[in-house]
Image (cartoon, rainbow, N blue to C red):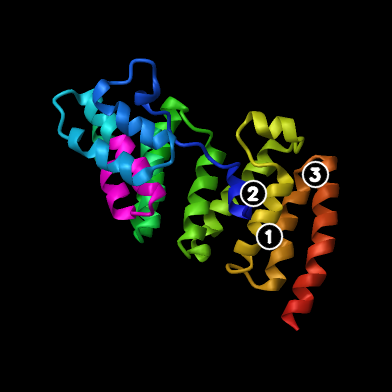
């Protein structure tokens, strides 16, 4: 599993209304294809229902198409479908999908704007843990080759650990926050592309004033192990 997937904890796809027991008959073949990971067929079978009279049916069809297009890495199609779905269901979750799909489609600025919209909506709905959302956005930036853009979002996560103070895995998991060890290992290769070697220790070291004892010990040990590698690579 890649370090990005570890950071994400492998974010799950949004729940499909069409996965309920009352799946519309029109979409059952598309849902079956989705469950079999047959993304082209799911996309093809859902498309005829994008203009259905029922808003609920249209929403589920757009969701199916967006998910299928994303799996096929057809990011322009996915972005268009998420946009249409957001018009029908203006939720924080769909705003987050638009943020990540925008980045994957090469529109980083648009992705950042959608992440701000996610923040606005999520403050009210609390649909998605913010840490998980930011991890998703970081993953999209990294996957799309924009590691240098991850610094402010990694810094936001760092400050969250400082605010929480407690680094117990169960405590973090209940709040949708990546384990500290996963955050350290996952953020390192991204920060190496954002900061000079001399800045890395200071960036992580800022956490030492706030983490609990176990967290400080783990961070110090981890830094002691990583900095000689940085020094060697810098020579």
* 113 with respect to 11 (left or right): left
Rendered residue at 75%/44% (across/down): 210
Which of disc 2 and disc 1 is earlier in sequence? Answer: 2
Prevailing secondary structure of the magenta residues: helix
* 34 or 9: nearer the viewer: 34
The span picked out in magenta is 62-81
Rendered residue at 84%/62% (across/down): 224
Q: CA distance from mark 3 to mark 2?
A: 12 Å
Q: Nearer the viewer, mark 1 or mark 3?
A: 3
The image quadrant of residue 106 is bottom left
**What label does residue 23 carry, if any?**
none
Residue that label 1 marks: 203
Q: Are marks 1 and 3 in contact (CB under 8 Å)?
A: no
Q: Position of residue 126 (x, y in %)?
A: 47, 27
Which of disc 3 and disc 1 is earlier in sequence? Answer: 1
Rendered residue at 62%/54% (across/down): 2
How busy is the neighbourhood of tag 2: few (under 14 within 10 Å), some, or many (20 plus)? some
Q: Is residue 210 above or below residue 153?
A: above
Q: Tell me if residue 128 is in the magenta stretch.
A: no
The image quadrant of residue 199 is bottom right
Q: Position of residue 159 (x, y in %)?
A: 63, 46
Q: Are marks 3 and 2 in contact (CB under 8 Å)?
A: no
Q: Are marks 1 and 2 in contact (CB under 8 Å)?
A: yes
**What label does residue 158 carry, if any?**
2
Residue that label 3 marks: 215
Q: Is residue 36 visible?
A: yes
Q: Is residue 89 visible?
A: no
Q: Secondary structure at mark 2?
A: helix
Q: CA distance from mark 1 to mark 3?
A: 15 Å
Q: Residue pushed farthest top?
A: 22
């Amino acid at each position: 599993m890649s370090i990005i997937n570890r950071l994400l904890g492998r974010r799950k796809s949004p729940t499909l209304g069409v996965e309920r027991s009352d799946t519309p008959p029109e979409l059952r073949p598309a849902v079956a294809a989705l469950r079999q990971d047959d993304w082209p067929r799911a996309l093809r079978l859902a498309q005829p229902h994008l203009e259905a009279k029922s808003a609920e049916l249209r929403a589920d069809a757009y969701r199916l198409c967006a998910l299928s297009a994303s799996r096929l890495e057809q990011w322009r199609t996915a972005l268009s479908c998420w946009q249409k779905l957001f018009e029908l269901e203006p939720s924080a979750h769909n705003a987050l999908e638009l943020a990540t799909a925008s980045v994957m489609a090469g529109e980083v600025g648009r992705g950042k704007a959608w992440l701000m919209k996610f923040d606005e909506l999520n403050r009210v709905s609390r649909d998605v843990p913010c840490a998980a959302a930011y991890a998703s956005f970081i993953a999209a930036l990294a996957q799309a080759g924009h590691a240098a853009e991850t610094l402010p979002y990694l810094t936001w996560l760092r400050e969250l650990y400082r605010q929480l103070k407690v680094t117990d895995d169960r405590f973090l998991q209940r709040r949708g926050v990546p384990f500290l060890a996963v955050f350290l290992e996952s953020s390192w290769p991204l920060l190496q592309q954002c900061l000079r070697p001399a800045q890395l220790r200071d960036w992580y070291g800022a956490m030492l004033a706030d983490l609990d004892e176990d967290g400080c010990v783990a961070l110090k040990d981890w830094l002691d192990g990583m900095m000689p590698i940085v020094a060697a690579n810098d020579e």
